[in-house]
Amino acid sequence: MRPVIAVLWAIGALAPAAASAGQAAPATQAHGGPPPIFVPDHQNPPAPEPVPPPPPERARPRAPLASYILPQDYPPGAVLARTQGMVAYGLRIDPQGRVTACRIVASSGSAALDEATCRILRSRARYMPARDAQGNPVPDRDQGEFTWTLPPR
């Protein structure tokens, strides 16, 4: 039974015999109510924009990304709440090697830790630019994880 017909049959808009035949029953045959209303199937959402293939020479961080996040960067609210966790992130890198965008791929469970991770990487992380086949600097993407661990008391 098609989903639309199944729903209409379930709400009493179709008689069982008509539903199994794939047709609407006349109003007098269903339950004496108004004729059934057919709802169009939902359109599929548009496909996401395709990710371009990586350049031949990928962007490389100038230093390990975790080294940009210092103990004093731990958000005070997260320290008070004794919050720890691992944040997975995705970065966009411009042709000059600067991080232009950061998105959280997997949350630590703490908005403060997630936001701090992206804020710090956008402002501090630097990369050796990616290069195309002709050696020109081009944009690239990177991803990683950072685990926030509470400093000792």
Image (cartoon, rainbow, N blue to C red):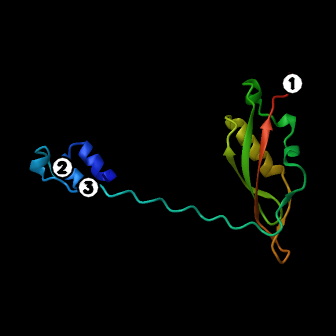
- Sequence-wise, the earlier of marks 3 and 1 is 3
- What's the amino acid at mark 1? Pro
The secondary structure type at the circle numbered 3 is loop
The secondary structure type at the circle numbered 1 is loop
- What's the amino acid at mark 3? Phe
Q: Which residue of the protein is positioned furthest toward the top in this rendering? A: 153
Residue 81, disc: none
- Sequence-wise, the earlier of marks 2 and 1 is 2
Q: Residues within 10 Å of mark 3 (few under 14, many from 20)?
A: few
Q: Quadrant of the C terminus?
A: top right
Seen in the picture, residue 95 relative to 116 is either above or below; the reply is below
Q: Residue at x 79, y 45 (%)?
A: 120
Numbered label tally: 3
Q: Residue at x 59, y 64 (%)?
A: 49
Q: Residue at x 35, y 57 (%)?
A: 41
> Badges 3 and 1: C-beta atoms under 8 Å apart?
no
Which residue carries the number 2 mark?
17
Q: Position of residue 152 (x, y in %)?
A: 87, 24
Q: Residues within 10 Å of mark 2 (few under 14, many from 20)?
A: few
Q: Nearer the viewer, residue 68 or 3?
A: 3
Which residue carries the number 3 mark?
38
Q: Residue at x 85, y 44 (%)?
A: 66
CA distance for labels 3 and 1:
64 Å
Q: Position of residue 17 (x, y in %)?
A: 18, 49
CA distance for labels 3 and 2:
17 Å
CA distance for labels 2 and 1:
71 Å
- What's the amino acid at mark 2? Ala
Residue 152, disc: 1
The secondary structure type at the circle numbered 2 is helix
Seen in the picture, residue 102 relative to 75 is either above or below; the reply is below
